[in-house]
Image: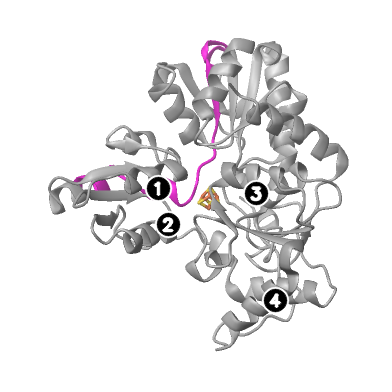
Amino acid sequence: MGSSRLSELLLLGQGLDLASERGVSCAGELPEASSPDLVARAVTARAALGSRAMILGHHYQRDEVIQFADITGDSFKLAQAAESNSSAEFIFFCGVHFMAESADILTSADQKVILPDLAAGCSMADMASAKQVDDCWAALEKIGVADRTVPITYMNSSAAIKAFTGKNGGAVCTSSNAARAMKWAFEKGEKILFLPDQHLGRNTTVLNLGLSLEDCVTWNPWKPNGGLSESEILNAKVILWRGHCSVHGRFSVENIEQMRAKVPGVSILVHPECQHEVVSRADVVGSTEMIIKTVENSPVGSKWAIGTELNLVQRLANRFPDRDIHFLDKTVCYCSTMNRIDLPHLVWAMESLVDGRLVNQISVDTETAKFAKVALERMLALP
Ligand code: SF4
C-alpha cells in the first residue's frame, strides 16, 4: 500500500469523517474523567431531561455508562427498543455508530438520536464500504448470478450497506436470527451474499443450515473479482464478505485448549463472530443475549470460559459469584470503539441538551434510511 493512500486514513478520534465508522474527534469541552462529581452531574442531567430522553446501553459498554441505561441489550434488542418507544424525544445511544444509525432509521422523524462520542465506530462495519459492495454486486451481475443472489447484511454494517440490501431484495440479520434470515433468503434465491462478517456467515451456514465449508467462498474486496474465479462464484451457495470483528476474531483454539487444561470441567461459551475453528470446538455458541441467558440459567458451581467482549464477561462474573466464570483469552480484549463512550462523554452530551444544545446527532439521509428500513423491517418480520 502506497503512503499516499495511508495518509488518507484518519487516526482514531482525530479529524472528521462522518461517512466512516473509523472515528472522529469530539468537538465538546469534556469534563475530566477523574472529576469526583461526575456521577452526581450525570444524575442531575438525567433527572432534568426526564421522560424526554431515553438512554440505551449495549452490553459491551463500561459499567460507569451502563448504570445510566434505561434499557440494556444487544444490537437487536436495542433496535426493537428504539422502534417501540415513540414518546422519548431524545435517544442517547451508548453503543456504536451503526447501532445509532439503526435507531435513527427506526424512530420517528421528530425523535433525535445522540451518540455521545462520534468516535465510537465499529471496525467490522468499516470493512464493507458502499463502493466496494456496489463493485461486488456489479461483478455478480456480470457473471449472471445477481438476480439469483439474496444479500443478507449483519446488523453491524453501515446504513448504506443496509440500504443496498433493502434495495436488492435482502434483509438485515443479527447473531440471534442469522439462521432464520439465511433460510428465508434461500427460499427467495439460490445464493446468499453475506455481509460483512465472514465468521457469522460461515458459522451459521455450517452449524445451522447443514451446508459445508465447501459451499462457501470468501469475497476479498481488496482483490479484483474478490480474489475468486468465475467457477468458484458459480458453484458457491454462500459468498462471504471478508470482514471480521477485531474483538471476537482474536479468540483461538489455543485459548480453548489452555482453558480446558487449566479448569477441568469448564464449558466454553462463545459468540458466533468467533472464527469457525473456535466455534466448532465450543460447547455453546450464541448471541450476546443468549450468552447472558445461558449463564443466568446455569447451575450454581458451573464453570464457564466465555469468548465475548470483556466488559460483559466481567459483569457476568460480578453478578454470578457462585459460578466460576473466566474470560477465554489470556489478554485484555475490550472493544476499543465501544469503550469510547465513557461517562465524561455521556455527561457532556446530556448537559449540552439540558442547556438547549443538541450535540452529536446521528441522522441518516432520507433515501438511505428508506431502503435500510426496508431491510430492517424484513428482519423484524422474519418468521
Ligand atoms: S465488538 Fe466487534 S462487531 Fe461489536 S462493535 Fe466492537 S468491533 Fe464492532
**Tag 3 secondary structure:** helix
Foreground residue, 175 or 230?
Answer: 175
Amino acid, disc 4: Ala
User: Which label is found at residue 99?
Assistant: 3
Between marks 1 and 2 in the image, the one whose residue lies nearer the viewer: 1
Q: Is residue 5 visible?
A: yes
Expressed as whole percent of the image width and height from the top left, the position of residue 261 reads: 13, 49
User: Which residue lies under the disc numbered 4?
Assistant: 45
Q: Which residues are magenta?
A: 230-257
Q: Earlier in the sequence, mark 1 or mark 3?
A: 3
In 3D space, how far apart are the residues under numbered discs 2 and 4 (Cα atoms)? 26 Å
In 3D space, how far apart are the residues under numbered discs 1 and 3 (Cα atoms)? 20 Å
Q: Is residue 224 visible?
A: no
The residue most toward the bottom is 36
Residue at image location 74% in from the left, 31% down from the top: 164
Q: Are marks 1 and 2 in contact (CB under 8 Å)?
A: yes
Residue at image location 64% in from the left, 46% down from the top: 81
**Tag 2 secondary structure:** helix
Beta carbon of the mark 4 residue lies under 8 A of ligand 1: no
Name which quarter of the figure residue 84 lies in.
top right
Local packing at callout 4 (Cα closer than 10 Å; few below 14, some 14-19, many 20+) is many
Establish if 358 lies above or below 287. Answer: below
Q: Earlier in the sequence, mark 4 or mark 3?
A: 4
User: Which residue lies under the disc numbered 1?
Assistant: 292
Residue 26 falls within the magenta-colored stretch: no
User: Which residue lies under the disc numbered 2?
Assistant: 312
Q: Quarter holding the C terminus?
A: top right
Q: Earlier in the sequence, mark 2 or mark 3?
A: 3
Establish if 136 lies above or below 318. Answer: above
